Structures are given as structure tokens and as C-alpha cells.
Image (spheres, rainbow, N blue to C red):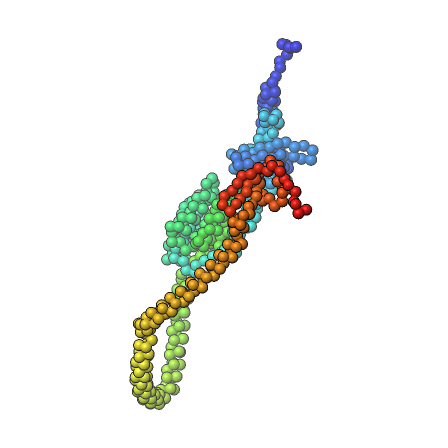
Amino acid sequence: MLYPSKQVLTVSELTGLIRASIESEFCDLWLEGEVSNLRMPGSGHVYCTLKDESSQIRAVLFRSSALRVRFTLKEGMCVIVRGRLTVYEPRGEYQIVVETVEPKGVGALQLAFEQLKERLAAEGLFDERRKKPLPAFPQTVGVVTSPTGAAIRDIFSVLRRRWPILHIILVPVPVQGEGAAQQIANALVLLNEHAAAEVIIVGRGGGSLEDLWSFNEEVVVRAIADSRVPVVSAVGHEIDVTLADFAADHRAATPSAAAETIVPVLADIVERLRETSIRAGHAMARHCLFEQRRLDTHITGLAQIRFRIQEESQRTDEATDRMKQLLCQHVIASREAVRNCQRELVGLSPLFVVKRCLATIPQLMKRLERQIIVLSERRRRQIEATAAQLTQLSPLAILGRGYSILTRVRDGKILRRAEEAQVGEEIVARLSQGQLGCTVKRVLPDPSV
């Protein structure tokens, strides 16, 4: 039965009307809840359920919004989200499309800071054993910071005042804002690969946590940890702490303090060298005076030493003459021994031994031939005797005396008794020469029974 006066909606039409009504009514709302059923597929979207003690709602954070979340969502985390309510039409379920998310009770940046710090510390990036010592007297220093900030002016001022012979390589980078972290990391890689810097200062002046956040980015922390050149972190003021400070080989409270850390005061070094030179001169003079007195004390014994040297020299000459005589005697004895060995070798010469052996070969050949003839005759007689025995024992010899061997055709079995054959059965009789095909007509009993 049809109802023309009534409007009949399809499920899709009804769902669309509900979605339009909900989206217009709840286009911008704030919601607090606990995260559960968290899923992060490869698409980059984030799906979860927000719940409280008695209710729950599905939530989705699309990839473009998820990339802006600095901390990591976890199961059971209490959050405050901002978004719009909509209906997911394929299932007819309402859900909230999240645009921003903040952890409840703690700032998003502070939570992201703690999460990243814990993860990188577990990897060992902050281990003290990774720290490299700073050079005592660097000739070239690299600086990674903004070219317009107060930090670079403070660094240049301190370096020029304390160590004016220093060569400074500035790699200008933005220190805050979108893409600043990647440029800072690229600058560190550049100084490691192409510059001659012996130490690197990376930092900026003070600011809020958001302003300093580039130095908390993972890409910057890893670039500092991977640097072959020692890195000094100088971010913000003394109370400011960033992850770059943990990864750096040395942390300075301020950019000025970083400059004071890496270079000494040239005037102080010169003064210390002057004082050291004076002390060394005095010490050398005292040492020379002491050695002069020792020489004066022992100079009287030099004449006796000369006489002893001459005496020992004469003894050396006599020992040399005796060694020459013994050496000549040894050479003569060795030559005689060589001649004796040569005479013995002539008698043991392989050619002589071969000739002597060749003379005995004909005699041995004749003996071998006689032995072969005797052995062959003996073997022939043994074979003939064995053949005769085999002939006597051969079944063919028995057949030659008039006997035959009967076998059944159907299975080839040899017949030993008459009752093993049946009347009409075909058998084969094997004679001494040839075979006969036979048919059994009668089976006679054994007359001996």
C-alpha cells in the first residue's frame, strides 16, 4: 500500500539531514575526555574514543591537524580538544573532528618536551660518555644563530675582546618559527662537513618556551649529538633549559658565557707565557751553575779515565788479533771437512747407485721369470683339479647319466614328488641336452610305500 501524501526518506537522506543539523549547531566546541581505543594508521590520521564516567564519543584527528600536535597521544591521557561535530554517514555515527588538542593540567609544549626528553635519553643521546672535550686554544669557531639578534653581538664582542686572533665562521639561521629547526640542523651539518671549525656555538637570546622551541626539536638535538665537532649550547638565559643543552658537549648559561667558555683571554696567556719564560730562564741558569760545579768536581778524574781508555784499547787490539787467528784456523778446518764430505758424496752419488742397481736388474728378471713359470704351473694344476670336482658335482653331470629335472609350467617349481603334479598339467623335462614339454596323464603312487 502506498502513502503518496507522506514524504518517505532514504537512510542516506535522513543521515544527511542529521549531519547538516549537527554541523550547523555544533560547528565549534570544546570537549574534555579520556583517550581510549587509540589508532594511528599509516595514513597519518589519528582515531580514538573520548570518554568520561558514563559516555563516549568517537574522535578523528586528520593528518593535517595531527602534524601540528607536538606531544604524543597515549591511552588514558586526559585531553581538552577543539573541533566540530559531524556524522560519519557510512555507519550513521556521530563523531567529533578534532582541530586542536591540549593535555589537561599541563601545557602541550611542556608535555612534548618531557616525552621527547625521555625517549632521546633512553637512546643514550644525553649520555655523559658521548661528550667531547673543548679545545684549549681554538683557532676557528663556528657560530649558528640569528645574524640580527643580540646573541651574535654578545658572542662577537666577547670573542674579539678575549681572543682577537680567532677566526669566526657565522652560519646565519632563523632561531624561531616554521622551518627554523631544520635550518639549524643543516647549519650544524654544514660546519661538520665543509668548515674548519674546531668548536661550534649554537644558540640565541632569551624568550618564552614557544620562542625557544626550535632548540627542542628532535632534528636539532640529533644534529648536535651527531656532530664530530664539539658543540656549546647557549640558548636563552640561565634559567632556560632546552633539549639542545642536554645533547651538547657543554652548556653555557648565556651566549656571552659560551664565548667565555671556549676561548681564554689572550692578554692573560701572554702574561703567563712571559712569567713562565722568566722562571724558565732562572731555572736554566741554576741548572747550568749546578752542572758546572759537577764538571769541576769530576774534571780531575778525566786524565785517569783517558789512561784507562788507552789500556782497554790495547786489550781490545790483542783480543782482535786472537780472534783473527782463531777465525783462520776455523776456516781451514771447515775447508778440510768440506773436502771429506765431497769425497763421501761421490760414493753416495745417485748416478753411481743407479748404475750399480742397473747391473743387478738382468739377474732379478731371470729369477722373476722362473718364479712366474713355477707359480703359473702350480695355479694351472689347482684350476684343473677344481674343475674336475665341479664337473662331478654339477647337475648337468647327473643329467648326463640319464636323469632329468621336471618343473611345472605354471609356476616353474621343481617337482620332487608325484603328487605335486596334477592330471592334465603341463610340465617341462630338462635333459642333459634339450628340454621336453609333457602333459601328465596319470599320477602313480610310490611303489616303495
Q: Nearer the viewer, residue 327 or 155?
A: 327
Q: Residue at 37%, 57% (x, y): give it.
A: 165
Residue 159 place in picture, x, y as percent: 41, 55
Q: Nearer the viewer, residue 443 or 26?
A: 443
Q: Nearer the viewer, residue 430 or 233?
A: 430
Above or below residue 13? Residue 264 is below
Q: Residue at 40%, 61% (x, y): give it.
A: 266
- Quarter holding the N terminus is top right
Q: Residue at 37%, 66% (x, y): give it.
A: 369
Q: Quadrant of residue 307?
A: bottom left
Residue 148 place in picture, x, y as percent: 42, 45
Q: Quadrant of residue 182?
A: top left
Residue 21 visible in the snapshot: no
Residue 218 place in picture, x, y as percent: 50, 45
177 sits to left or right of 320 = right
Q: Residue at 32%, 72% (x, y): give it.
A: 359
Above or below residue 340? Residue 103 is above
Above or below residue 381? Residue 74 is above
Residue 220 visible in the snapshot: yes
